[in-house]
Image (tube, rainbow, N blue to C red):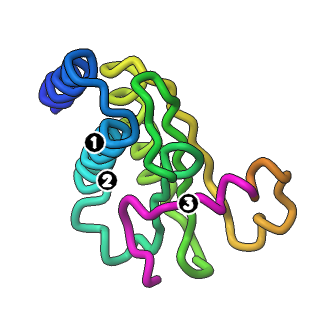
Amino acid sequence: MSERWSTERDKLIEQLRQNPSGSGWCRLHTQLIDSILVSIWNETIGDAANNFNFTLGAVGGYGREELAPWSDIDIVLYPNKVVQSIDDRFVRELFKRSHDVIGGELGLQIGYSYLLPGSIAGSDSKTIASLMDCRVVAGRPDG
């Protein structure tokens, strides 16, 4: 999977060198990272998707679709409703695969957080501010 993503990213970087386009290029880069994360989401969650009531969000510059060539990728996983039990195998695997592909293969920094219901109110101002730019990448935003 990752060789395809590396090749697509290399093409984007070359396109930027040949024809700098600012925010237009940043949106294309964001769309590539979205595609990678959706693919990882689908491979990780698979058939359990109907029972996995979580959403994967993009925050910060990534959430605003402002990904420069070496911007960090910040993601947040949050439940859509109060969950009685969480099979954290999916959460761990999702974050591991994201780190392997985006961090390892593409060489980009990836930061991730996991928010539980009720934890946002007690979060620091940086976390709360980043959620203002949150954009759904994958999951069930309808709960």
Q: Residue at x 77, y 72 (%)?
A: 118
Using the image as rendered, state which of residue 64 and residue 114 is in the foreground: 64
Q: Which residue is mark 1?
A: 28
Report how far apart the C-alphas of labels 3 and 2 lie in the structure.
17 Å
Label whose residue precedes the other's in the sequence (1 or 3): 1
Q: Is residue 86 visible?
A: yes
Asked whether 131 falls inside the magenta stretch, the response is yes
Q: Residue type at mark 2?
A: Trp
Q: Is residue 143 above or below residue 137?
A: below
Q: Residue at x 45, y 22 (%)?
A: 70
Q: Which label belongs to residue 88?
A: none
Q: Which residue is mark 2?
A: 41
Q: Is residue 3 above or below residue 24?
A: above
Residue 36 is left or right of residue 123, and the answer is left
Q: Residue at x 38, y 34 (%)?
A: 22
Tell how many labels: 3
Question: What secondary structure is marked by label 2?
Answer: helix
Residue 102 is left or right of residue 56, and the answer is left
Label whose residue precedes the other's in the sequence (1 or 2): 1
Tell me where residue 96 appears, x and y as whole percent.
Answer: 43, 35
Q: Which label belongs to residue 134?
A: 3
Tell me where residue 53 appears, x and y as whole percent.
Answer: 45, 74
Q: Residue type at mark 1?
A: Leu
Q: Residue type at mark 3?
A: Cys
Q: Residues within 10 Å of mark 3 (few under 14, many from 20)?
A: many
Q: Residues within 10 Å of mark 2 (few under 14, many from 20)?
A: many
Label whose residue precedes the other's in the sequence (3 or 2): 2
| Of labels 3 and 2, the one closer to you | 3
| Of labels 1 and 3, the one closer to you | 1
| Of labels 1 and 2, the one closer to you | 1
- Location of residue 123 (image quadrant): bottom right
Q: Which residues are magenta?
A: 129-143
